[in-house]
Image (tube, rainbow, N blue to C red):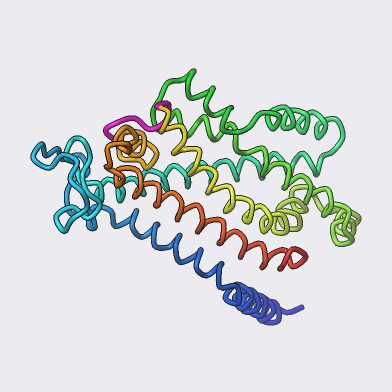
């Protein structure tokens, strides 16, 4: 097969995948939502009308208005600015955790599935042990032991979130290493590193990418949950779960905006990521296409 032919085939596949994705309206909506929140996070300093930590005792607990689109909190801080900066914090943590957990799980799962035998059994039993406990519980215990803060939160969630990726990568590798082209490459003397990087990894990546997109939403929720109970992001940093935690005591007295807007941001972000993940799954796994 010539190089030009391969390029044409790749372009044809990309065009077909694009059509599949665009035909799923909910996936397009999800991608749009995610893109908007990423844009908000990147352009945060330009979009926020007031510094998120600026205290104004003359504007305490003001309701939404032209001066403060989302109202103000108990310190008179502009909630619109805090929600914008909260997007930067939550998405940054999510990106870091998802990227490193995906790389770690992909490496461990692929190597485990390819080597097999006692090494595979040992690694998978360790993975099963970690997966016996809910990831948020593991993250909560680790965050409590190591203390609060963004670095602690990232490490705690990273430790508990790579196992699902490892199992997916391992399962795909077990299937791929028995395929005809891998067996043929091995038969003509192909090195294990060549087989792993050029034949197995490219085919393992698509389902792992789908899983990572879907797990991104869980990371956002776990970040908000741990910050809400006080063992995640610490004040005065703006983070959606922390903003809700600081405003929950005012719900009864009618200051609904303190929890509504950060809660809405969490809901939209997680929904967008899930819809985007469904669209990617339709592209890379036709068997699950609706």
229 w.r.t. 262: above or below? above
Q: In this view, does 286 lie to the left or right of 54?
A: right
In the image, residue 235 lies in the stretch drawn in magenta: yes
On the image, the x and y values in percent for residue 243 come to 33, 39
Q: Which quadrant of the view contains residue 127? A: top right
Image x and y of residue 189, in percent: 86, 53
The number of numbered discs placed on residues in the rendered structure image is 0
Question: Who is closer to the viewer here, 85 or 80?
Answer: 80
Name the chief secondary structure element in magenta.
loop
Q: Is residue 91 left or right of residue 109?
A: left
Compared with 29, 87 (above or below) is above
Instruction: Name the residue at the top extreme.
Output: 145
Q: Residue at x 49, y 18 (%)?
A: 145
The percent coordinates of residue 239 (x first, y second) are 35, 40
Closer-to-camera residue (193/235) = 235
Q: Which residue is at a point 60% across and 44% down the rendered structure image?
A: 103
Viewed as shown, does residue 233 lie left or right of 217?
Answer: left
- The quarter of the image holding the C terminus is bottom right
Q: Is residue 216 magenta?
A: no
Vertical side of 287 occupied by 253: above or below: above
From the image, which quarter does the N terminus lie in?
bottom right
Q: Residue furthest left?
A: 58
Residue 210 drawn at (x, y percent): 63, 56
Q: Is residue 192 above or below residue 34?
A: above
Magenta range is: 230-236
Direction front: furthest residue: 253
Residue in the picture at 78% in, 53% down:
195
Question: What residue sits 27% from the left and 37% below the top?
Answer: 253
């Amino acid at each position: 097969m010539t190089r030009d032919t391969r390029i044409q085939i790749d372009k044809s596949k990309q065009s077909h995948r694009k059509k599949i994705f665009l035909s799923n309206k909910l996936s397009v909506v999800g991608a749009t939502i995610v893109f908007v929140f990423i844009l908000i996070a990147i352009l945060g300093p330009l979009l926020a009308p007031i510094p998120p930590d600026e205290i104004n005792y003359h504007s305490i607990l003001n309701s939404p208005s032209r001066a403060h689109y989302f109202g103000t909190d108990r310190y008179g801080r502009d909630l619109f600015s805090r929600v914008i900066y909260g997007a930067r914090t939550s998405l940054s943590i999510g990106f870091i955790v998802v990227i490193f957990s995906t790389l770690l799980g992909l490496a461990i799962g692929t190597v485990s599935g390819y080597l097999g035998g006692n090494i595979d059994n040992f690694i998978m039993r360790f993975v099963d042990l970690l997966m016996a406990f809910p990831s948020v519980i593991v993250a909560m215990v680790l965050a409590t032991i190591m203390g609060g803060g963004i670095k602690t939160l990232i490490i705690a969630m990273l430790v508990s979130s790579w196992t699902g990726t490892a199992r997916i990568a391992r399962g795909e590798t077990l299937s791929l290493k028995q395929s005809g082209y891998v067996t043929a490459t091995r038969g003509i003397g192909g090195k294990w590193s060549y087989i792993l990087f050029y034949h197995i990894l490219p085919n393992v990546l698509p389902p792992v990418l789908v899983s990572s997109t879907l797990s991104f939403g869980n990371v956002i929720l776990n970040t908000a949950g741990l910050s809400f109970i006080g063992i995640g992001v610490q004040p005065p940093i703006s983070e959606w779960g922390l903003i809700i935690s600081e405003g929950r005591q005012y719900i009864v007295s009618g200051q609904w905006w303190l929890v509504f807007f950060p809660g809405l941001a969490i809901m939209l972000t997680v929904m967008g990521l899930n819809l985007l993940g469904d669209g990617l799954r339709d592209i890379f796994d036709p068997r699950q296409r609706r």
